[in-house]
Image (cartoon, coloured by chain):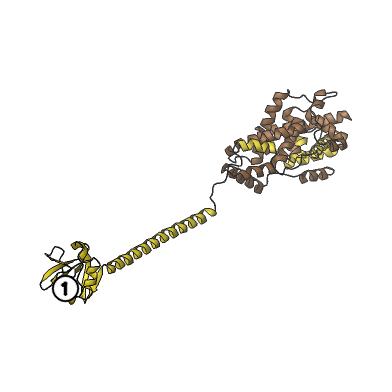
Amino acid sequence: MIEHPEIEELSSWLDERLPEGEASDLAAHLAQCDACRRRADGLDRVRRRLAALERVAPRAELPPALGSVLGGEGWRRRRPPVLSIWSPIATGVFVLLGLGVILLWFSQQSARRLEETVATATATAAQVRSLAGREFRLVAGAWTEAGVAADAPRRSVAADEPLARELYASVPGLAEAVARGERWVLHWRGETVELTPPAQRKGSMPASE
Amino acid sequence: MGDWQPLLEASAERPRWGRRAVLDDDRELAERHRRGDARAFEELYRRYAAAVINLAWRLSGSRVEAEDLGQEIFLRVFRHLARFRGEAALRTWIFRVAINHCRSRLGRRRAPTEPLGEGDEGGRQAIDPGPSPERQALASDEERQLERALAGLPPVFREAVVLRDVEGLAYEEIATALEVPVGTVRSRIARGREQLRRAIEAKR
């Protein structure tokens, strides 16, 4: 084997980059050729010494200077979007919170309506009175007996008139109510009578029974 | 293979990059950066800073300058990482950024260095002992001689040899990083090693 290998072949052989046949031929040549073997030996020594050169130590974190420059370019301000596994969980929590708020609002509305109904009933009850088994409602400032139409013609009777005294005798409690300044409208002997309190009769007082 | 077998075994023991898991991890890192995860870039820096600064050291011949070059390189990486689409391994892509930046910076600073010969002052001037005086004091004559010889190589040979023998890249990765065919890589590595061998043996 006279032909000596090219430097590319020797170098590639050291890196195990030659096809198997060429590699074995070259190895056989080196076994016989001192010059080529010394050359390959020298190349390999270079290779090994380069690999053994001092290296810089691994870096644990960004140097401050680089960090500050990158900071100006948005590094650190860039944050991953809120996605991944937490996204459906967060969505579920928000939906539940929303449902909770809606239910709370409805329950408050219902409670308010109930309170209004009770208040209305209470107010209604306060506007109905009963005297001697006869029912009266407060209509336009006058306690009006049930069944009396709002536009029914009525006879106005002063608190101290004889007719009024007949009414006081027939309806216990009526005289005291009129004395308190209340107006009363009621049926009496086929007509509608309106009793006017004494304050509205220029200082006159209802007569006691 | 006889006497060569131990040498080849020792060569095979050198750390190799390119494991699939690492590559997948790299792509995920780039994707996280694209999504705006600030921690992704910090992780990327921790993973590749030493290799990049080391590469810059061996290409520039100056450890001090390599630190500045390293920061500039990572600034470029930060700005352009969103464009990385995973056609090559992230590590190879970062090395390409590093090589291009070093060419730009070092090319402006000085003309390409001629192969080191006897009494070559340019090669010696390019060497910076760096911030490791203790190790420098302890370093063997052979190591200093090798550093001078390396600094004296033409840049294209130096790049190929450093990527192969210092950083441990495969030929295909070097071809991607240097943007040249694999055959050119093979030739540059061989010729670079040969020039180093001659330079070292000439000093004996």
Q: Residue at x 46, y 59 (%)?
A: A96
Q: Is residue A17 visible?
A: no
How many marks do you count on the picture?
1
Q: Secondary structure at mark 1?
A: helix
In the figure, residue A169 lies in which quadrant? bottom left
Chain for disc number 1? A
In the figure, residue A181 lies in which quadrant? bottom left
Q: Residue at x 21, y 72 (%)?
A: A175
Within 10 angstroms of label 1, few (less than 14), some, or many (20 or more) residues? Answer: some
Image spot of residue A148 (x, y percent): 15, 68
Chain A: colour as depicted: yellow
Image spot of residue A202 (x, y percent): 19, 61
* Quadrant of the image containing the N terminus of chain B: top right
Image spot of residue B127 (x, y percent): 80, 29
Chain B: colour as depicted: brown
Closer to us: B10 or B40: B40
Q: Residue at x 25, y 69 (%)?
A: A128
Image spot of residue B166 (x, y percent): 76, 38
Q: Is residue A79 visible?
A: yes
Q: Which residue is mark 1?
A: A165
In the figure, residue A160 lies in which quadrant? bottom left
Q: Is residue A147 above or below residue A35?
A: below
Q: Residue furthest right?
A: B204
